[in-house]
Image (cartoon, rainbow, N blue to C red):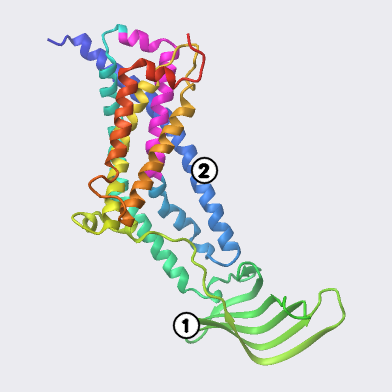
Amino acid sequence: MVLPWEVNFVVIFFKYLSKQVYQLLLGITVVLIMVALFSRFIQYLGQAAIGELSSDILVWIVLYRMPDFLLIILPLSLFLSVLVTYSRLYAENEMTIIFNSGMSEWTLLAYTQLIAAIILATVAILSFQLAPWGLRNTESLLLQQGKLTEVDMITAGRFQTFDLGSRVTYSDRVIENSSGQRELQNVFVAVPVPDSAVGSRIILADFARAIVSGEDRYLELENVRQIEGEPGQTDFSISRFETQIFLLPESEEVEEIDGEATLPLSELLGSNNSRLVAELQWRLSLVFLVPILIMLAVPLSRVSPRQGQYSKLFVAILLFASYILLLQICRDAISRGSLSPWVGVWWVHGLYLLLGLGIFNFPYVNYRFSFGKNS
C-alpha cells in the first residue's frame, strides 16, 4: 500500500528535478541556438556580400534551417543539463538525502526518462515533420535564387559586389519597365582587367537589364560610356556605345542539401533504396538518441563533493560527439551500400546503451570517467 506522504514526496521530487533540469536545458539551448544561427548567418551574409545570395532571403533561410539545428541541439542540451544538474545534487549531498529517503538509482533513472519525454516528443516531431519541411523550403528558396540574375539582386543606392567580389555594380534607381522587366537606371560597373595593360574598366550606362538565353545570362547596357585605364594615371581612354552586352558568370551554388533529407516520412517508409533507408534510420536514430543519452547521463553524474559538478563535462561532450559521429558514418555507409541496413545504425545505439548500463551497474567504470579529485 502506498501511503499519501509517499505520493506527495514523489510528486514534489519529480517537480523539483524537472524544474532544475529544464531551467538549465533552456539556458544551454538558447546559447547553442545563438551560436549555430550566428555562425550560419555570417556564412550566408558573406555569400550575399559577393553576390551569391540575395540579402532579402537571409533571415528566411536561417529560420527554415532552425528545426534541423534543433535536432542535434536539443538532445545535447538535455544530456548536459541532466549531467550538470545531477552532479550538483551529488556534490552538495542532496542525492544522499534523496536515496536515504527510499529512492533508488533505477527509480531516479525512470523519473529522468519521464522528464525527458517532452524532449523526446519534440525531437520526434522535428525529425519526422518540421526539419524536412524546413529543408524543403530552404531548397525552394535556393532554387529560386539560382534563377535570379544580377539585376534581380541589385538594391538601389548601394554598391554591391558580384562574381566572387571581382565586380562592383551600382544603380541609382530600380524600376519595372512596360513589359514588367526589372530595369536599372544610372548604372555604374567597375570591372578589373587582369590580363590586359588596362588596369580596370569603369562602365557608366543610363539603363541596364538582364537577358536570359537558355543557360546563359547577359547584362544589356544602353547609352554606355566606358573608361579604361590605370587608377591614378592620366593615360586612359573613353569609349561610347549605344548598346553593350556582356556575359554574366554562372550562379554559384549557395548550399547543397541532400534530396533525401527533404522527403516526407511517408516516402521513406517501406523503401528499398539504400539512400532512403539511410535517411529513415538517421531520423529514427535522433529519437532513440534521447533515452540512451539519459541512460548515460544519470550514472555519469555520480560525483563526490570534492570532484565538483563539472568534472564529467568533458567526457560527456566526447561521448556525445563520438555517438553522433558514428551514427553519421553508418548513415553514409548505408547510403553507399557498403553497410547492410539490417546492421545499420542499430549497433551504435546498442553499444552506447551497453556503455550506459556498464557505468550504471559498475561504479569502477564510472570512477574511470572522472577527472576531478576523488574522495
Residue 284 against residue 98 in the figure, above or below: below
For this rendering, which residue is in front, 322 or 73?
322
Q: CA distance from mark 1 to mark 2?
A: 42 Å
Answer whether residue 86 is magenta in the image: yes
* Mark 2 residue crowding within 10 angstroms, few (<14) / some (14–19) / many (20+): few
Residue 346, percent from left and from top: 27, 41
Q: Looking at numbered disc 2 in the image, what kind of residue is underneath it?
A: Val
Q: Residue at x 38, y 26 (%)?
A: 82
Q: What's the magenta bit mostly, secondary-structure-wise?
A: helix
Q: Residue at x 28, y 28 (%)?
A: 113
Residue corresponding to mark 1: 180
Mark 1 and 2 residues: CB-CB less than 8 Å, in contact? Answer: no
Residue 339 against residue 159 in the figure, above or below: above
What's the magenta region?
Answer: 70-99
**Label number found at residue 36:** none
Q: Looking at numbered disc 1 in the image, what kind of residue is underneath it?
A: Gly
Q: Which SS class for mark 1?
A: loop
For this rendering, which residue is in front, 313 or 315?
315
Is residue 170 at all visible to an observer of this figure?
yes
Residue 269 against residue 103 in the figure, above or below: below
| Left or right of residue 95: residue 307 | right
Q: Which SS class for mark 2?
A: helix
Looking at the image, which residue sits at the far left?
Answer: 1
Q: Residue at x 72, y 86 (%)?
A: 225
Residue 161, percent from left and from top: 63, 68
Label 1 or label 2, whichever lies nearer to me, is 2
Residue 21, percent from left and from top: 38, 26
Q: Residue at x 66, y 71 (%)?
A: 168
Residue corresponding to mark 2: 35
Answer whether residue 140 is magenta in the image: no
Looking at the image, which residue sits at the far bottom?
Answer: 242
* Mark 1 residue crowding within 10 angstroms, few (<14) / some (14–19) / many (20+): few
